Amino acid sequence: WMAPKTVEWTVIVLTCQHKDSVCAFQKELESRQRRGVLDPRTILLTVEDPTAHVGSGGATLNALLVAAEHLSARAGYTVVTSDVLQEAWILIMHMGRDFPFDDCGRAFTCLPVEDPSAPAEALVCNLDSLLWTMTHQLCKGSPPGVWVCSTDMLLTVPSAPEINWDGFQGAKVISVPGTVLYARNHGVYLTTQQGLVCDIIYRGSEAQIQQCARPDGKVPLVSGVVFFSSETAEQLLATHVIPPLNACTYMGLDSGTQPIQHGGLLAGAETFSLSAPPQLSLFFDIMLCMAEGMTEEDFVNGRTQGAGSSHTKGAVGMKSARSVLWKALHALPLSMACIPDGSYGYMTMAASDHIHNLTLCTGSISHLPFCKPQLLEDGSSITNSLLEGAVQLGPRSVIQHCHLQGPLKIGSGCLLTGLDMTSSLALQSCQLQNTVIQGHCIRLQDMPCKMFTLTGPAGDGGTYLNVPWAEFFHRTGIREGDIWGPDTPQGSRCLLNARLFPVLHACEPLRVWDVLWFLGSQTGGQLQRWRASWRMSWKELLTCLDQAAELESRRALFFLQAECKLRSVLLEHQDHSLLPLIRSAVHEGYQEAMLSTLDQVASTASDAGVAARALACIADVLGCMAKGEGGLRSGPAANREWLPAFHRLETGDIAGGVKALAKERKKWLGRPALLVRAARHYEGAEQILIRQAVMSSCRFVSVGWAELLPIGHWVLVECPARIDLSGGWSDTPPITYEHGGAVVDVAILVDGCRPIGAQARRIAEPELRLVSTSGTLEGEVLLELVCQDLEDLQDYCQPHAPGALLKAAFICTQIVTFPSQKPLRVQLLENFGGGFELRTWSLLPHGSGLGTSSILAGAVMASLYQAAGKSTSTESLIHAVLHLEQVLTTGGGWQDQVGGLVPGIKIGRSKARLPLKVEVEQIPMPDRFIQTLNQHLLLVYTGKTRLARNLLQDVLRNWYARLPTIVQNTDALVSNAEECAQAFQQGNLPYLGDCLNRYWQQKKCMAPGCEPLAVRHMMEALQPYVYGQSLAGAGGGGFLCVLTKEPRQKEALQHILAKTEGLGNFSIHTVEVDTAGFSMQLVGSDLKSSVHGGGEMAHRAL
């Protein structure tokens, strides 16, 4: 057996008192499994106690039997066998008794915390807190066995304790240190120096408690957590067939066994709750018999710190039960593990304590990976509530599961739960202070009802609403006989059995005012209305609670609140991830409400960026609905059925487009494959809106008029490549205009030449001749096209179509108008007296990562502008390329054209706003630093082709989901770019290398999978010899940029990589910073000389 890093539970059992609660609580466990909180392989069981008040000991034995039965069935046995316990980790969690401040018990009491790291967003209950503590802290490293945990406490374990499990046998109790004062009303352990338990003392005298004190004066408190080894659990399980313990299990009762007739009190906090009868205790009837200091006579006869007198009624049955337990378990050792930094807080029956736990004591659960939500005011908390309008909450007050409309002012010391909008008006007329108002879902036979209770923060003690009963009667006119019948003895009359709270009226609905009037004097016939109602006491109320309806009400309110949160996050441009909320909505069946809200946001948003993010969220909803089936999320998105909706978006009709998308979506919900395809088309729709947002950069394109060159005269443009040294991805739309971007780029000559170019000229024929060559490392590719009609240009927006970039360039430079009623020939003759010939080349391989396509687009547009008699600036070209790439639908950023069109080393920046504007700043550097850099920079061609399109889709999906890691990484990309600029200013190569290494880690975070295995091996081999290295561009292949520690290392690196296995075809190339930038030459009509002057010279160099 090897100690696991975290516990993978085989079975989790949740015990509860009432059979009516089983289905509701089982649904809650299964919900956590769907959300990924619990392992999908774990068996989840909700088990009701076989009889009322069976006690924690009886509930433990019954739960263990049920768990063993299910494990036996899964293993193929036909009878219950204890062998299945040998390799099982079982967790039994006891719900305990009813809790007056939460209708679903202490386990499902919601805590004022959130878990931002959870895959699916949900309310955090005490059960979740304890599950996390048990799974990741306390139980980590334990051998197989059975853990038992009460849920009536707030348990803190700040760090994973070092519990010694070597050679462990028997059982172990978990303790936390507490004060002697606290221990007076609690249980403590008396142990030997070796950590073996001698006795368990409950509500002992100060002298008895002091015996347990440790050197620091603290005493080990009973925390409600115990562990049984597999062997000990087997021994305990064996008692389920022995009378009278068989009466504690459902099997015993189903066999006709009579329940144990309980006698005197058994210690344990459960005994003193709501005047319950005694029961079989986990601690004082099961654990205590293993204590080293216990004798059989004292234990069996009940003469212990926790047991009552052996002369009480039913003592014979309890003696017999203890005798069985003694024989089965006493020989096994009971040890204690005390968690030094742990703390424990029992959830008492006092409202003031409960409010304290939910406000001032939220630090008691701060060890969890949860963070506190924003509180309305210090010392107050709001959980799962929707507050509209001005709602002022005083200190030490709590609102849970409420939907209220302001203006409201809630004073200090108040607890409001389960109230809806209809309660708001009544609350506005009250001055609440130290008051508990609760709405309860109940069921009277088959009729669901809502009723309200009103109490004060203190316990009963002869008072109600903080005043004596007599004063309450005098103020309200209520008589003692109204709430207690003559059969209730005077000494037994208390709030628990007072029939105070209206349940039904004869002819009108129940309102919160039916109890709020208790706070004042009788007015407006309230007393008569109250007397005419059918009323209940707290005790009767607890038997009618509809916990399924209550949990469903909380869930509905959570998603109603979620819809408001969704709107605010989108409309206010918040960097908050909505994906956990989307997953939760799909898990819980609220996807239609989520889709409707997203449709509304997308169709009414005045900002195309907001609409685009809303459409991306719809794609995520559809993807989640597919539940991991149906294929890959990335894929084509041009199905004819979706084109009418796309056309509306393209023409600027966002509302109509969203409506058409929603109509089409309904046809694609039938199975996972259709859902995934629908999600792809929503991402396609989102890209349309991104394109429209980016096209706002057109206002920064300024084009003037120049002399029209004679027909046949060439305009030759040659461009350097670029390497990005930091900040890439922050230039990518929509990141660049939603977050803001900064990229450090270097314009470079590769092996001494500019590898990218274009040349254009006018020709007499009214047609477009397109010639394109690319690649030398992978073999040259030649493309020749002639376009004589507008139909030949119609695939300009399909990036993989032949000559698409060149066709789009003619349209974006407005040389050709498309679509148009005028034929292409007519347009060319009227405007230019003929057509154009355009030739382009790139000597770099496809997917090089050196910005080829964007730089080539800049070269093409520069040559076309000049050939058409137009002039423009470099800044205009940068924004014109942005426009062209949106028309081309490749969705690129701006760093490539900045890198290749602006000379030298620079930092480009864009602000988080529209219209998108790129500003470029040359980075000043020390003298001769560029020459030094030239000697230390090299490019290594990896031989791997980069698939940027898939990477881009994944990055945009993660950005729109605002995954916290992506948002943080985007912040880091921008800050690293500024640091990189500082490194250049300082002329500091090691600092520059650090920025480059950091950049590569940031790229991998942004686009997981961008590091092929061969590239990783290459980088590992080079690591000792370089200050820094990173794949150029998006990663995934292409060129590796390295900054070497020593100058002129091309041959040395060649030798190192040649000895490295598994690299395939690689090559190393020199790099020089191009301080001149792209060049434009006006040459004659001699095609041969112009081509040789540009392309062929570069070809020979490479």
Image (tube, rainbow, N blue to C red):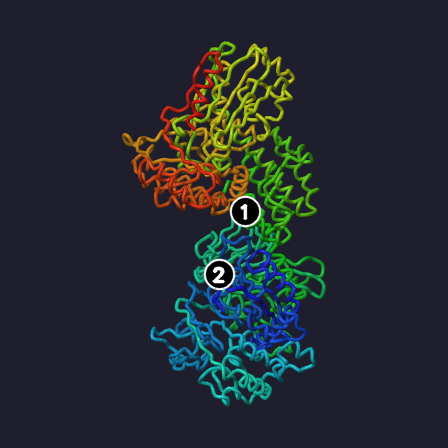
Q: Which label's residue is closer to the chain start, 2 or 1?
A: 2
Which residue is at the front of the view, 862 or 765? 765
Where is residue 836? Give x, y as percent: 55, 15
Mark 2 or 1: in front is 1
Crowding at mark 1 (Cα within 10 Å: few <14, some 14-19, many 20+): many
**Amino acid identity at mark 2:** Leu
Where is residue 267? Give x, y as percent: 51, 79
Where is residue 730? Give x, y as percent: 45, 37
Q: Is residue 531 above or below residue 1040?
A: below
Does residue 739 appear in the picture of this structure? Answer: no
Residue behind mark 2: 358
Name the residue: 52% across, 40% down. Answer: 951
Does residue 923 appear in the picture of this structure? Answer: yes
Name the residue: 61% across, 82% down. Answer: 245
Quarter location, residue 477: bottom right
Element at label 2: helix
Crowding at mark 2 (Cα within 10 Å: few <14, some 14-19, many 20+): many
Element at label 1: loop
Residue behind mark 1: 578
Name the residue: 28% across, 32% down. Answer: 926
Residue 922's disc is none
Circle 2/circle 1 CB separation < 8 Å: no
Q: CA distance from mark 2 to mark 1?
A: 26 Å
Which residue is at the front of the view, 643 or 372? 643
Where is residue 326? Give x, y as percent: 53, 85
Q: Quadrant of the C terminus?
A: top left
Q: Is residue 156 above or below residue 61?
A: above
Horizontal relation, residue 935 to residue 866: left or right: left
